[in-house]
Image (cartoon, coloured by chain):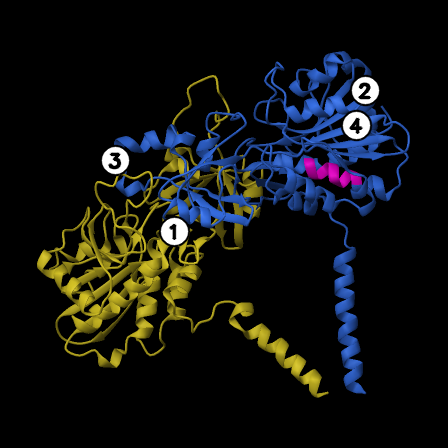
């Protein structure tokens, strides 16, 4: 009888253990958080599920606020300086714009990317009734070798579901406004390097979630610290812009990708920050020039704590920049990432972990 | 005592579950999936050959003969075969043709590209390198949109060729790539995403060819089980995508080898057919292709058999197959029974499982009756 009891206990343990039962809510490694976060769909304007998931991961003692757009944030401490760290929850993708009479879907692009990347690829449509798999149809003349091909544009993206009428597509649950992402998978190139979709900016989200667990918020004195997970960055820094009315930081640290040219097809005449060599201070980008005197403070903090840091210039905007006209200094903190806005955004574990350390150090030492 | 009874009860439940799992016949879709997951670029078919043998009933697997090109032959019946059924088992794939100082792999293709965009569809795609130490994961590099000058963006997208293909396996040097087990000439294939579309449609890279290969396995299984009296030979052909240089129009080496090896009068080719370029449709049944001289004799017969078995069938007198020519030159009688494929030669070839099932039924019905 005793043996049977043990057998039952073993079965129960197996079921409730994180390996068998799903996400371990106590695992706050940014690397593991990232691997869970990338799979939650959150095309710009459809970030609710990502916000819900992040909310479920945050320390319960923090007073989290949420607005109608699904921006999430919490503030701890009082007085100046006010430090704000922001990562965005949205990702590039599409939303369903039209269901055609033959059951295919025309879509609206959200964010900037090479349209051809989606040609003849499998995608997922997230409907109220569950996920539906589809295919982005190749251009109609793709197999013709006897004529010049028309270039593939964003307007050419059309999704095939395996049905032949609008009614059949609707029966699958597809509606106008449903979000569409690539059929995601994580490719672990080495134990320390992975490539997948939505590293931008779920890695930033993971860093802030991990940091929120590792900081002793009771120790925050003579400063105010706000952590924000905002929406619609990819479509024009919209979530952050709306927050400028509510939040008035002195310093903003946008935690987002540094698009690195550490890849074989990009010119290395700028943005060359190798993966695995530490986080990057994104000193200059297309939306912001961080004052040298200010980002040097970050360098000093990193040096004091032996955190490896790189410095660089890349392109693209960041959420912190919308706070600059309001009086803040924007110092984006990043990991070096290659193949930006693709299905294989590549990231190194060491960079992500050191970036988490850097965020924590800035919160403590600034 | 109660404890012993409980243990026996659990053992019984487990035994029932496992025996049910073991005795379950592989459905056509499960067979297709088994075959689909195996990489089989032309010239690298040995894993596929092993998989086919593994999937066959043990008696049939023991009878398999393999030639030195990699073609597999399985005979049924004791006398000389009356019919041969041939299906390809190779797909278009790549191999490692170089490893650079930064660890990136350069890749090439031994077989011709089916169309100009074929290689561009692997940009940014996860890939696998088949090394002696096991599969190595990689991704095919593409430029970052943020830091690519506007005037270069279209160029990258529309004029991609393999000289711009860098396979990133996460290494920093050639030596590190070698330590992972990667060697020049290792096979490289795209990640096999199996996509479940609505209803009975499925999609994936090289799914048409893999499904044809699997159908022949299913057919062999059924023939073996029913102890069919039909004298036939089934052939899974290697290197069908690699054209023989001296034969015009170009035909795969594996097909020419099979033609020279088998001496049956009737040849049934089982192959995929693209719906885009032909007057046929997906989901409307297999497609019959007959050389002109056989159309009068065989068309009505095949139709009658299909009708008797309630199997849908598509036919168009204009449809032709290059693969028929070598057999026709020797006065052998050949027809193709084809599986319709949409978005042919892309990473998302679509098939309809109903077409596949109908094709298998038709092949069974036709044997010994033509």
Specify whether disc 1 shares its chain with disc 4. no
Q: Position of residue B269 (x, y in %)?
A: 72, 26
The residue pinned by badge 4 equals B84
Image point (21%, 73%), residue name: A364
Tell me the colour chain B is drawn in: blue
Type of secondary structure dominating the magenta stretch: helix
- Compared with residue A134, is residue A231 higher up or lower down, i.e. above or below? below
Whether residue A72 appears in this view of the structure is no
**Foreground: disc 3 or disc 4:** 4
Q: Residues within 10 Å of mark 2 (few under 14, many from 20)?
A: few
**Residue pointed to by mark 3:** B149
Disc 2 is placed on an element classified as helix
Query: Which chain letter matches label 4?
Result: B
Label 3 element class: loop
In the foreground, B110 or A104: B110
Of tags 3 and 1, the one toward the viewer is: 3
Mark 1 or 4, closer to the camera: 4
Residue B163 locus on image (x, y percent): 40, 30
Query: Badge 4, how many Cα within 10 Å: few under 14, some, many 20+?
Result: many
Mark 2 sits on what residue?
B300
Dots 3 and 4 on the same chain: yes
Q: Earlier in the sequence, mark 2 or mark 4?
A: 4
Can marks 2 and 1 be said to lie on one chain?
no
Image-based side of A40 in relation to A239, left or right: right
User: Color of chain A here?
Assistant: yellow
**Of marks 3 and 4, which one's residue comes earlier in the chain?**
4
Binning the other alpha carbons within 10 Å of mark 1 as few (below 14), some (14 to 19) or many (20 upward) gives many
Chain assignment, label 3: B
Question: Pointer 1: what residue?
Answer: A43
């Amino acid at each position: 009888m005793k043996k049977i009891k043990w057998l039952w206990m073993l079965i129960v343990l197996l079921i409730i253990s994180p390996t068998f039962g799903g996400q371990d809510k106590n695992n706050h490694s940014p690397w593991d958080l990232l691997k869970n976060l990338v799979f939650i769909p959150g095309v710009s304007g459809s970030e609710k599920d990502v916000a819900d998931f992040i909310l479920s991961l945050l320390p319960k003692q923090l007073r989290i606020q949420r607005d109608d757009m699904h921006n999430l944030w919490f503030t701890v401490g009082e007085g100046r300086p006010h430090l704000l760290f922001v990562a965005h929850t949205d990702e590039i993708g599409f939303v369903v714009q039209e269901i055609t009479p033959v059951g295919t879907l025309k879509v609206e692009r959200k964010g900037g990317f090479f349209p051809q990347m989606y040609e003849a690829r499998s995608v997922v449509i997230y409907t109220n009734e569950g996920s539906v798999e589809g295919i982005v149809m190749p251009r109609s003349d793709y197999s013709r070798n006897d004529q010049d091909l028309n270039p593939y544009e964003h307007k050419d993206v059309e999704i095939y579901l395996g049905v032949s009428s609008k009614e059949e597509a609707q029966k699958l649950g597809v509606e106008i406004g449903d979000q569409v992402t690539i059929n995601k998978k994580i490719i672990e190139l080495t134990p320390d390097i992975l490539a997948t979709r939505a590293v931008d900016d779920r890695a930033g989200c993971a860093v802030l979630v991990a940091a929120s667990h590792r900081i002793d918020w009771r120790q925050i004195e003579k400063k105010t610290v706000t952590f924000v997970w905002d929406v619609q960055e990819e479509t024009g820094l919209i979530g952050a812009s709306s927050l400028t009315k509510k939040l008035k930081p002195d310093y903003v640290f946008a935690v987002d990708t540094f698009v690195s040219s550490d890849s074989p097809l990009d010119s290395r005449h700028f943005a060359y920050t190798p993966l695995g060599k530490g986080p990057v201070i994104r000193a200059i980008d297309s939306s912001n020039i961080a004052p040298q005197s200010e980002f040097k403070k970050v360098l000093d903090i990193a040096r004091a704590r032996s955190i490896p840091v790189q410095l660089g210039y890349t392109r693209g905007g960041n959420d912190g920049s919308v706070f600059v006209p309001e009086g803040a200094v924007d110092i984006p903190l990043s990991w070096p990432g290659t193949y930006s806005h693709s299905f294989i955004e590549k990231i190194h574990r060491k960079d992500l972990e050191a970036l988490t350390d850097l965020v924590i150090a800035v919160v403590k030492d600034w | 005592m109660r404890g012993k009874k409980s243990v026996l009860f659990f053992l019984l439940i487990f035994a029932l579950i496992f025996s049910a799992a073991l005795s379950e016949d592989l459905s056509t879709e499960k067979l297709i999936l088994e075959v689909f997951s195996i990489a089989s670029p032309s010239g690298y078919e040995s894993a596929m050959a092993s998989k086919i043998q593994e999937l066959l009933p043990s008696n049939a697997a023991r009878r398999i003969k393999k030639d030195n090109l990699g073609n597999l032959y399985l005979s049924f019946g004791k006398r000389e075969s009356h019919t041969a059924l041939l299906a390809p088992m190779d797909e278009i794939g790549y191999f490692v043709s170089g490893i650079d100082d930064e660890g990136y792999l350069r890749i090439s293709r031994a077989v011709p590209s089916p169309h100009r965009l074929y290689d561009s569809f692997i940009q940014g795609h996860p890939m696998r390198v088949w090394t002696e130490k096991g599969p190595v994961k990689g991704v095919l590099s593409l430029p970052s949109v943020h830091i690519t000058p506007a005037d270069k963006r279209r160029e990258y997208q529309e004029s991609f060729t393999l000289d711009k293909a860098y396979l990133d396996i996460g290494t920093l040097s050639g030596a590190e790539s070698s330590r992972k087990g990667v060697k020049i000439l290792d096979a490289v294939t795209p990640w096999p995403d199996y996509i479940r579309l609505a209803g009975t449609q499925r999609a994936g890279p090289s799914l048409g060819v893999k499904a044809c290969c699997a159908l022949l396995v299913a057919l062999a299984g059924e023939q073996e089980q029913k102890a069919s009296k039909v004298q036939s030979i089934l052939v899974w052909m290697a290197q069908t995508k690699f054209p023989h240089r001296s034969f015009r129009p170009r035909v795969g080496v594996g097909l020419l080898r099979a033609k020279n090896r088998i001496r049956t009068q009737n040849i049934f080719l089982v192959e995929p057919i693209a719906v885009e370029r032909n007057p046929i449709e997906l989901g409307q049944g297999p497609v019959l292709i007959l050389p002109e001289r056989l159309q009068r004799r065989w068309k009505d017969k095949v139709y009658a058999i299909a009708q008797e078995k309630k199997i849908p069938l598509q036919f168009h007198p204009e449809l032709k197959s290059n693969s028929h020519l070598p057999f026709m030159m020797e006065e052998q009688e050949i027809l193709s029974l084809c599986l319709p494929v949409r978005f042919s030669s892309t990473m998302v070839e679509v098939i309809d499982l109903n077409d596949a099932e109908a094709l298998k039924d038709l092949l069974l019905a036709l044997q010994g009756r033509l």
